[in-house]
Amino acid sequence: MANKSVKKVKDPALMIAPSKLNLWLFMLASCMLFAAFVSAYIVARPDAEAKQLWTSFDLPVYFFYSLLISILSSVSIQMATVAAKKDELSRNKVLIAVTLVLSVLFCYSQYLGWSRLVMQDLTFVNSRPEHISASYVWVITVLHFIHILGGIVLLVIAQVKSLRLEIHKKQITFMSITNTYWHFVGLLWFILYLFLYFAR
Amino acid sequence: MSTSALHADHHTHDHHHKESFISKYVFSMDHKMISKQFLITGIIMGVIGMGMSLLFRLQLAWPDEQFGLLEMLLGKWAVDGKLDPNFYMGLVTIHGTIMVFYVLTAGLSGTFSNLLIPLQLGARDMASPFMNMFSYWFFFLSSVVLLVSVGVETGPASGGWTVYPPLSALEKAMPGSGLGMTLWLVAIALFIISALLGGINYISTVLNQRTKGMNMNRMPLTIWAFFFTAILGLLSFPVLLGAALFLIFDRSFGTSFYLSDIFLEGVGALENVGGSPVLYQHLFWFLGHPEVYIILLPALGITSEVISTNARKPIFGYTAMVISLMGISVLSFIVWGHHMFITGMNPFLGSVFMILTLIIAVPSAVKAFNYLTTLWRGNLRYTPAMLFSIGLVSFFISGGLTGIYLGNAAMDIQLHDSYFVVAHFHLVMGSAAIFGMFAGIYHWFPRLYGRMMNNTLGYFHFWITFITAYLVFFPMHFMGLAGVPRRYYQFTLVEDFSVWMDVNKLITVSAIVGGFAQLLFLYNFFVSIFRGKKAEQNPWQSNTLEWTSPIDVRLHGNWPHELPTVYRGPYEYSRPDRELDYFPQNEEDATAPEVLHVEEKEVAKEEAPVENSVFFAAIKRVFGLSR
């Protein structure tokens, strides 16, 4: 009787793969890092404005293109994940490849955006005192770009795994992690872009 | 089936694998070995940090004396046996950095979170043993870089452990602002990576790897404390990383996030302006205040466990203790401004920070009250661990009370940067946490090494350390109230301060005696590892699961066969219906109402204390822990 009962004792542990939970915690930590930079921007701006050391400038349109690309890539990675869950492996391979192409396009649009900033004399190390606002834009966008590079590494691994038929209905964890992370960096860019656009 | 259970078979096979010396002792992925690595590194860093404090205490007590020993030890930094002022500042800075981050954060939390989270939860190992190993090695690398920075030509960072700009941002500001400061930043960046890798692992393990029956309301308070500590670290260390990145950019790239309008010898020191040094303080203290609790909460968790075990009583107010830990954790994020009352803060904002700060006294008082009521009329066993835990409670109360003064904006403006502040945080954060760490070492030494430490040496260690800690830090309150500022190199040149020279001598002599007492501990610790009396399986008659895993052999996977199943909470001591005065969590008793069998669930629910079930149901809902 006792042994029988033991087997029925409720197990409270969650049904989440450790790697997935770790990813969520990492994303939380990343959010705090960006929150720090965004808060710094908000705190620094009034002081600098009072000393007439703050320049408002329009964000390069290429950053908006980055936003559109990131939305498209989120759609494609989501479709790739759904395809993997349905065991549609060819479709999964193609959609991961599409996401990879879009991620490269995202990087290119970022490069064009930064080039435009440099052309406007809005460099990371501000060439004029009143351009300190540009330093913030550089820090935030470059740091986000580093997160994108991490996502591209995941996408490349996912692509290789899909080509080796290691991603399918019963082996979905890595695809799911890549999907979550790519949505995260996309959402992050959406929020950061809106912030930089409206706070300029 | 839980993730732990899923991995069970895998791990039981694991411990049969032959391990090489490198994989067993160096790049180990066994949480117990990593715990020892954190502990030994923490002890080494602690000895160095304390040694530094003795050097600058010598300077403060006998500023005009020449100590040949100093010249022999420090060379050009102590010409004619007198400490160089710049090196004095460097010692103060590195002492603070080592003690706060390397001893009381990594040394304390790294050791006991690693040791106890899997063992007390009934898990084979951490969620990611690989990340866990990296966490230690980043910490080790960080320690090496920091120690190397002490030996560079221009001296270590010397702007105080908070490294406020502009001192830390301008290389020309002082010798320590050169390479030493750069290395300090590198060391802290590595440390943050280590803390984040560890923190992610701790949270993930607590949420995901608990054994059968280990509901969150059955977790020992140590685990709750480590859990909240890890959350604090996860949310606050990235902000410090942000602050450090801005500082690196200002120092090395020429940006001006923190710098504006600085002139050296009448000439503008900056090419770029427009930043604000106060911004650094906001970012730094957003970590800095939670850091206080990152240090203190593990010590409080350890104390809960040790006091309950050695009082042979259930901890008083388990639920209140958990809520207090949570309350302290939440509040710690919204009080950073109390470190900045004198930065020209808007008085209204200052009042907000003041009120929030004073509210922390409520959960803190609940914890102190619960410790005292657990001790009250208990069958106390005065083991060294118990004495150190009681010592923690003493420091927590005496140091915590002065926090109420400093949290008051009007008082803080007077007391800021005085010895009152030094006294406050050395008692409530420094001494309390280090006593918690000692309590943990004495209590879990048998679990770590399978042997017992010598109790007599432990008693001497406790009493000398306890008395000298008060002799060192209590008089500092009076110095601070009289306006004596902290971080000064010499007080004899100002009459108002020179009257405190005798007190300074008393403090230094006490510090030296206290320092020598630590040699007793070191002797006891290292000799007991090899020659201590062999420990019994459960030497303290404790309820928690770590004592059910074999302690005479090191087993990667913790339990040779099945993982233990948990039937009750961790603090069921002196139950009247039991012959023994303890009731291990894994011991089955079909007649006990605490056994939550599925078929009896409804009945048990009715019998469970209402406040427990409601509280934990709410927690589970908030954190999404219920299935």
Image (tube, coloured by chain):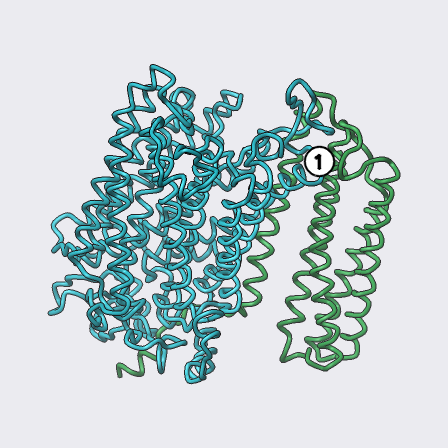
Q: Secondary structure at mark 1?
A: loop
Q: For residue B617, what is the image quadrant?
A: bottom left
- Say whether residue B87 is visible: yes
| Label 1 packing within 10 angstroms: few (<14), some (14-19), many (20+) | many
Q: For residue B467, what is the image quadrant?
A: top left
Residue A6, how many percent across, how many down? 32, 78
* Chain coloured cyan: B
Q: Is residue B268 above or below residue B335?
A: above
Q: Nearer the viewer, residue B7 or B93?
A: B93
Hey, which residue is sitting farthest top in the picture? Answer: B495
Residue found at x 65% / y 21%: B263
| Residue underneath mark 1 | B255
Residue B178 falls left or right of residue B622: right
Residue B454, how many percent across, how many down? 19, 61
Label 1 chain ID:
B
Say which quadrant the N terminus of chain B sits in. Answer: bottom left
Residue found at x 30% / y 54%: B302
Residue A87, how many percent across, how many down? 71, 80
The three-letter amino acid code for the residue at tag 1 is Thr
- Say whether residue B611 is visible: no
Image hue for chain A: green
Q: Nearer the viewer, residue B17 or A88?
A: B17
Residue A41, how many percent across, how many down? 67, 35
